[in-house]
Amino acid sequence: MTGIPGDLSSLEQVREAFLFLSERLPASLQKPRVAIVCGSGLGGLATTIRNMPRAEFDYSSIPHFPCLTVAGHAGKLVFGLLDEQLPIVLMVGRAHYYEGHSINQVTFPIRVFKHLGVDTLVLTNAAGGLNPEYAVGDIVLLNDHIFLAGLAGTHPLRGPNTEEFGPRFPPLSDAYDLELRRQVHRAWREVMDAKSERKLHEGVYAFVGGPTYETRAECRMLHQLGADVVGMSTVPEIVVARHCGIRVLALSLVTNNAVLSPVPRGDDSRIQEKPAKELDAILREGKANHEEVLEAGRLAAIDMQRLVVQTVSNTFNHD
Ligand code: HPA
């Protein structure tokens, strides 16, 4: 055992999950090159994969795989061929730290992907927009992150380092692959309808533990620190992927705009005569909720799907 006792990221447990999958996969799907993590409402990507050959596994059937607890998030691995020749694996639904999994459990699948032969990881997620130029429905290509929990020590690589995976002190100054980002901008021009209002941005993602959405003061703080979007996933997986040498592409769908203005004061003269019902309406403006996040995901899912498929196709056709 090279990990800490009970550490789900230990090499042996990764090997068990790997063996479980490889014993069941048809030969043509044994070695996926690309893994795509589908965020909230973005599981439709699985429909872009042809039926044959195809293999699906519920997370609950795979040894040590973290299972999901959130409504609206399925939980299965789908193996198939993109463009009828590129073997890929999709994670439809992902485990989040806020569900109670340890940060090692959340990132466990990434090391299984590495064992399977994955060299490119594409992550999608739903996120709150902090940058005032971002609108709901826009897509943000991540080029950096702020991992406050990681900086404070809640980090997926904490503990004895498993050399088989990667080095003790991996650099993250170039975590978000530049060539893949270039491919995303190209693919965007190819797939997006010129009349669409949807915009593509590049920006910085701040990871928060959740499950509460942020307060206004927290949003202002994250924005002042340099973050453009905020969300509850992705960064731990990116850290583990970079540790084991997988190149990374990450896309956020802006599902809601974080409120940056301070909450109204109780002694504000403009609200003194208002009935309590109207106060509620004032406070409701900009309040994030899970249904809104899922709805924005449904509307933008098709564009996100096309962007990811086009990017991956272009990248591997030019390989
Ligand atoms: N904050 C954190 N996570 C999120 C948000 C948000 O506003 N929207 C979607 N996921």
Image: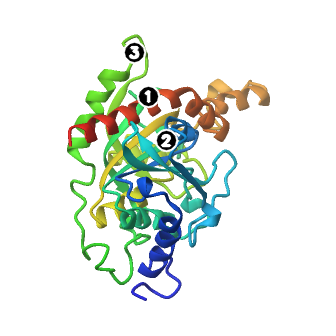
Which mark lies nearer to you, 1 or 3?
Answer: 3
Residue placed under numbered mark 2 in the picture: 127
Q: Which picture quadrant has residue 11?
A: bottom left
Q: Which picture quadrant has residue 290?
A: top right
Q: Nearer the viewer, residue 261 or 76?
A: 76
Q: Position of residue 179 (x, y in %)?
A: 20, 42
Residue flagged by tag 3: what amino acid is it? Answer: Asp
Residue flagged by tag 2: what amino acid is it? Answer: Ala
State the CA–CA distance, disc 1 to disc 2: 10 Å
Residue placed under numbered mark 3 in the picture: 193
Residue 138 tag number? 1
Write the residue at 41% across / 40% down.
82
Position of the C terminus by quadrant: top left
Given contact means CB atoms under 8 Å apart, are the residues at marks 3 and 2 in contact?
Answer: no
Write the residue at 39% across / 36% down.
83
In the figure, 202 relative to 115: above or below?
above
Q: Which comes sooner in the sequence, label 1 or label 2?
A: 2
